[in-house]
Image (cartoon, grey):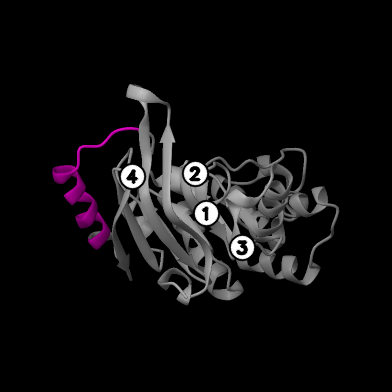
Amino acid sequence: MTTTTAVRSAARVVDAVKVYGTGDTSVRALDGVSVDFPVGRFTAIMGPSGSGKSTLMHCAAGLDALTSGTAHIGDTELGSLDDRRLTLLRRDRVGFVFQAFNLVPTLTVEENITLPLDLAGGKGDREWIDALVDVVGLRDRLHHRPSELSGGQQQRVAVARAFAGRPDVVFADEPTGNLDSRSGGEVLGLLGRAVRQTSRTVVMVTHDPVAAAHADEVVFLADGRLVDRMTAPTADKVLDRMKAFDTTSPLGGPS
């Protein structure tokens, strides 16, 4: 058994390479990255602009294909799946939270939360969804529509929707990017509680040291490579590590 699977991984990439473009204009967004995201843990991915953090998340989640190397959700290697099976895997085993809330304006909070389950033709576990509603603190907003909610409340709906189908892993891409600091802190605290209370796994891309400090571990990328990992992060420690990139790393390309 390899070191990446000694602790059960909800998701992992091995020797991940992602190249955009060809010839002289090609950009190597990921350059041989191997990283695992353990079950029941909240992991943040950080790095300067152009470091490859969003590319890593998209490839680990099956939203984009690697040029070489492998990406896995649990024991399933994503490159072995055809488009239909990959779509089903993302639907059944992966949740997503984005910077834009992506709620359906004509649906209520409750309908937005259960939308992925409804589209899949199932009702889901009502007891689980009921518990989620309490975790995200939306019991008194279930019959409201998104326009009647604050930005922070809308993102809490998006978080509940991401967890509704009991996914193996939830990927969050700058989930507090459109929120003020108070609302952002509430959403980050919510993600942490969801990990602890539901034993789910969260992988979050962020540029914010304060956001990263809510995670159990931070992985740092630079120039498409994994350069450091930090457990029990604090905002100050993360900021100090990020400052080091400004003086040592010439960067470019997609983030």
Residue at disc 1, secondary structure:
strand
Identify the amino acid type marked 3.
Val
Distance, label 4 to label 1, CA atoms, is: 16 Å
Please tell me how crowded label 1 is: few (under 14), some (14-19), or many (20+) other residues with Cα within 10 Å.
Answer: many
Ranked by sequence position, the earlier of labels 3 and 1 is 1
Disc 4: which residue:
224
Residue at disc 2, secondary structure:
loop
Disc 3: which residue:
136
Of the numbered discs in the image, which one, if any, rests on residue 221? none
Which residue corresponds to the image point at 37% horizontal and 66% vertical from the top-left? 217
Of the numbered discs in the image, which one, if any, rests on residue 71? 1
Q: Are marks 2 and 4 in contact (CB under 8 Å)?
A: no
Q: Are marks 4 and 1 in contact (CB under 8 Å)?
A: no
Whether the magenta-drawn stretch holds residue 61 is answered as no
Ranked by sequence position, the earlier of labels 4 and 1 is 1
What type of secondary structure mainly makes up the magenta span? helix
